[in-house]
Image (spheres, helix red, strand yellow):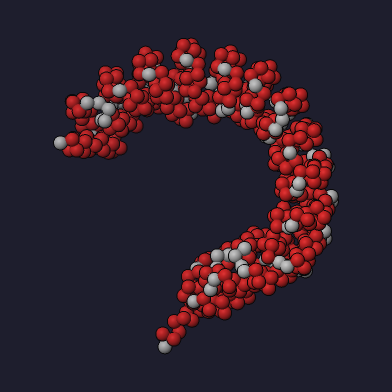
């Protein structure tokens, strides 16, 4: 009897679990659909499991979302592409639920399945589904329909294609704004599948209707369509049909639409070509840079460098630079921050002379901005300016501001400066570095913020690599070792950290003569944290120094630490001693 009942078991369990009050059980059951389908076999999956799922679409959104996702990869479990149409009914019912994420997942799954179906199955099963959804009484069905037209259209007969275009046109004029929004956001995808003869006559007519919609949420989605449609049209058609729309949108009464234009401007410029960009879109962009709404100015400011790449330097200086100067003192800190993140990229576009004349004063004002993010964005891109104007001019004009920022009250600004110092040092040379930045590097080792102290220690290592051990021995090592008597244990700890990073760069001789005596002395510190860091440091020094030094000095120090009252100190000391024993055994 058990043998007879065996095949019924999976579907019975699924049904029980899908009806269970516990949502987690229902979810687990849906996520195991592929396992259950394998157990049932292809025929029973088609005849029992799929119909059951079609009837079971009245469930919690989380369960329905999981079901919509599972069905998208279910073609192998129902017998391959020739049986793919059996998956459409449950997904069709999921396309009509109220929850947006469930509908979107169902549409995504329908697109996956439809793109694999044979042409005759598409015409017989998929296209009727599109029509039913498009004619649905409930808006959710019509919203879902907009997302699958591009899958259904290519395999249709001419008569069906005409019908589908007419249906999409109706959706673009639907009473519900949500449907028009869906039609606007999917128009670009649908347009890529439509024959070029119908692009101007029909698709552009739909597009024109959407651009004049009374809902700003529909118009702003039509902005995205400008770029997509512009790439499909011939250049002269693009200029005639898309360019006027972009210019109008840049003056739209809704700031959200203007924001979308500012955000998509580079893509829109690519669609209409360089000539129209210079003659028609420069005035539109200038308007956006001077917009009343800060959000629009933020989006426009963030595109200033990309936009200037499309222009010649003269046009950029004439039209864009005056706006950039205004934005550098904008009342919104977020506008200034967006500008600071990209303005350095304008230097290579404008060239050396124009950068010195026009951009340097703007850089300086942004470097002194009261908002830390603005200063941070300028500091992190200084190398772009250096490549254009050279280090001499950079050091004269910007370095005083950089030195000032090295003591900024916001630690992230100080951190950005530290990370830039090795690059600055390599460009400025040893002499300039010693005069201006040497003292700062030591000062950062005693900063209140750990991230700054850690970055400062790493900075010393990178400087030693840049200028060599001899320079480091003269200018870095004595100052670092002087800190070992600092009354604050955290600063004494940073000495150990700096030694651990610098020792591999400085080599065995300096490590043994200068670093090791300081480390051994630190092993007698009263603070356990110092002592177990000494143990960790000694372990890292083993590969750097000679075996005789390990046996004579390091081992004895670790043996003393292994008898310390503190459990952590003993643990790390024993770890280091085991490491010595392992190295000795390997050598023998």
493 over 277 or under it: above or below: above
Q: In the rendered view, would you say 398 is above or below 216?
A: above
Q: Quadrant of residue 367?
A: top right
Instruction: Please say if 435 is above or below 578.
Output: above
Q: Quadrant of residue 6?
A: bottom left
Question: At x 65% / y 60%, what residue is drawn?
Answer: 104
For this rendering, which residue is in front, 567 or 1?
1
Q: Quarter-wise, where is residue 301 in the image?
A: top right
Please state, as top left, top right, bottom left or bottom right, where the N terminus lies in the image: bottom left
**How far across and down, in percent of the image, does residue 333 sit?**
68, 30
Please report the residue visible at 63 percent of the width from the left and 19 percent of the height from the top. 352
Q: Is residue 261 visible?
A: no
Spot the residue most to the left: 588
At 65% from the left and 68% from the top, the residue drawn is 119
The count of marks equals: 0
**Residue 561, can we see it?**
yes
Q: Position of residue 356 (x, y in %)?
A: 65, 17
Q: Pick the residue in front: 408 or 295.
A: 295
Residue 281 image position (x, y, % from top left): 78, 35
Relative to 523, is 83 on the left or the right?
Answer: right
Horizontal placement of 297 versus 397: left or right? right
Residue at 82% x, 44% y: name it.
240
Q: Residue furthest bottom?
A: 1
Image location (x, y in percent) of residue 9: 47, 79
Quadrant where the C terminus sits is: top left
């Amino acid at each position: 009897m058990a043998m007879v009942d065996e095949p019924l078991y999976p579907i019975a369990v699924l049904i029980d679990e899908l009806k269970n009050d516990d949502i987690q059980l229902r979810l687990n059951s849906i996520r195991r659909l592929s396992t259950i389908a394998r157990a049932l076999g292809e025929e029973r999956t088609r005849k029992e499991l799929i119909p059951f799922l079609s009837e079971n679409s009245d469930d919690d959104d989380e369960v329905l979302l999981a079901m919509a996702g599972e069905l998208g990869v279910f073609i192998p479990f129902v017998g391959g592409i020739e049986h793919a149409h059996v998956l459409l009914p449950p997904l069709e019912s999921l396309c009509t639920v109220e929850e947006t994420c469930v509908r979107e997942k169902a549409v995504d799954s329908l697109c996956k399945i439809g793109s694999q179906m044979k042409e005759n199955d598409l015409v017989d099963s998929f296209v009727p589904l599109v029509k039913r959804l498009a004619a649905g009484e409930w808006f959710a069905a019509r919203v879902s329909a907009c997302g699958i037209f591009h899958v259904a259209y290519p395999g249709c007969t001419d008569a069906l294609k005409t019908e589908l275009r007419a249906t999409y046109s109706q959706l673009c004029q639907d009473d519900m704004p949500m449907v028009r929004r869906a039609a606007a956001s999917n128009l670009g995808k649908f347009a890529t599948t439509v024959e070029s003869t119908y692009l101007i006559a029909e698709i552009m007519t739909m597009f024109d209707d959407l651009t004049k919609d009374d809902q700003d949420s529909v118009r702003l989605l039509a902005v995205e369509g400008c770029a997509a449609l512009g790439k499909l049209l011939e250049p002269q058609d693009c200029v005639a049909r898309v360019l006027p729309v972009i210019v109008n949108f840049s003056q739209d009464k809704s700031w959200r639409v203007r924001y979308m234009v500012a955000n998509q401007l580079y893509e829109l410029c690519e669609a209409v070509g360089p000539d129209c960009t210079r003659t028609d879109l420069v005035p539109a962009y200038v308007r956006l840079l001077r917009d009343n709404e800060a959000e629009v100015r933020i989006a426009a400011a963030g595109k200033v460098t990309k936009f200037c790449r499309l222009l010649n330097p003269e046009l950029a200086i004439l039209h864009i630079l005056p706006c950039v100067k205004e934005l550098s003192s904008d009342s919104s800190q977020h506008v200034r921050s967006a500008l600071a993140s990209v303005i350095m990229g304008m230097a290579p576009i404008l060239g050396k002379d124009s950068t010195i004349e026009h951009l340097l004063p703007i850089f300086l004002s942004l470097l002194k901005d009261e908002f830390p993010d603005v200063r941070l964005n300028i500091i992190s891109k200084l190398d772009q300016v250096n490549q254009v104007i050279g280090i001499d001019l950079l050091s004269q004009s910007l370095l005083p501001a950089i030195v000032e920022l090295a003591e900024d009250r916001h630690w992230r600004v100080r951190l950005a400066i530290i990370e830039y110092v090795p690059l600055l040092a390599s460009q400025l040379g040893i002499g300039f570095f010693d005069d201006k930045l040497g003292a700062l590097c030591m000062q950062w080792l005693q900063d209140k913020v750990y991230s700054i102290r850690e970055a400062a220690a790493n900075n010393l290592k990178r400087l030693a690599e840049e200028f060599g051990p001899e320079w480091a021995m003269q200018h870095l090592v004595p100052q670092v070792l002087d800190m070992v008597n600092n009354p604050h244990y955290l600063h004494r700890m940073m000495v150990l950290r700096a030694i651990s990073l610098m020792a591999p760069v400085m080599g065995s001789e300096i490590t043994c003569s200068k670093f090791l005596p300081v480390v051994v002395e630190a092993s007698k510190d009263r603070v356990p944290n110092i002592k177990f860091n000494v143990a960790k440091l000694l372990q890292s020094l083993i590969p750097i120094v000679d075996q005789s030094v390990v046996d004579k000095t390091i081992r004895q120090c670790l043996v003393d630490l292994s008898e310390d009252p503190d459990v952590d100190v003993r643990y790390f000391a024993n770890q280091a001693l085991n490491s010595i024993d392992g190295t000795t055994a390997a050598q023998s």
